[in-house]
Structure formats: C-alpha cells, structure tokens
Amino acid sequence: MLASRPTFSHIEDALASGAVSLDPHTTYRELRVRAPVYWSEHLEQWLVTSFELVEDTLMQPYRFSNFGYDTLFIA
C-alpha cells in the first residue's frame, strides 16, 4: 500500500500566489521539518528541502532524473 502524501494548503497557496518568493525561508524551513520530500500539486513536481537529501539526489541523476523518459515512453 502506498503512503499518502501530505498536502499543506497554506504552502500550496504560497507557491501558487508567488508569496514564497517574498519569504522562501519560512516555507522551506517548514517543509524541511514536516515533509523534507514534498509533492507540490501546484508545481506538479517534487520539492526536496534538506541539504543531505538534495545532495543525495544531485549525486544520483540516473535515479532521480526524467531525462530520456519521453523517448523511452514513445518507444
């Protein structure tokens, strides 16, 4: 069974309105504590907010990139 993804409406509102641009630290601090890997419905992408997880993600592009996905999908 898949675990449900947490959704925080106030964070989604901040992302949708652009308010996160004015004060990104508060939003990303909350995500680091509550959901360091967060799926944003508004952005339709994953947000990775802790240094260690970002570093791990960037060091493994073969696991965490969608590069080539469209070609593979078409094939």
Image (cartoon, grey):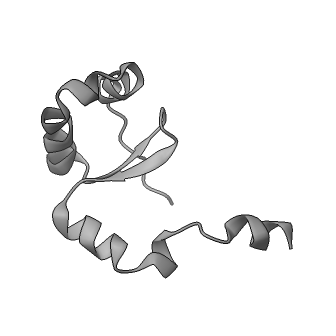
x and y, in percent, of residue 42 in the image: 48, 32
Q: Residue at x 41, y 46 (%)?
A: 5
Q: Residue 53 falls in which quadrant of the image?
A: bottom left
The answer to whether 28 is drawn above or below residue 64 in the figure is: above
x and y, in percent, of residue 12 in the image: 37, 28
69 relative position to 21: left or right: right
x and y, in percent, of residue 35 in the image: 25, 49
Q: Residue at x 17, y 28 (%)?
A: 23
Taking depth in this image into account, of 20 and 38 the one nearest to the observer is 20
Q: Residue at x 34, y 79 (%)?
A: 59
74 relative position to 28: left or right: right
x and y, in percent, of residue 22 in the image: 21, 25
Q: Residue 25 falls in which quadrant of the image?
A: top left
Taking depth in this image into account, of 52 and 3 the one nearest to the observer is 52
Q: How many marks?
A: 0
4 relative position to 35: left or right: right
The answer to whether 1 is drawn above or below residue 68 in the figure is: above
Taking depth in this image into account, of 49 and 1 the one nearest to the observer is 49
Q: Residue at x 37, y 19 (%)?
A: 17
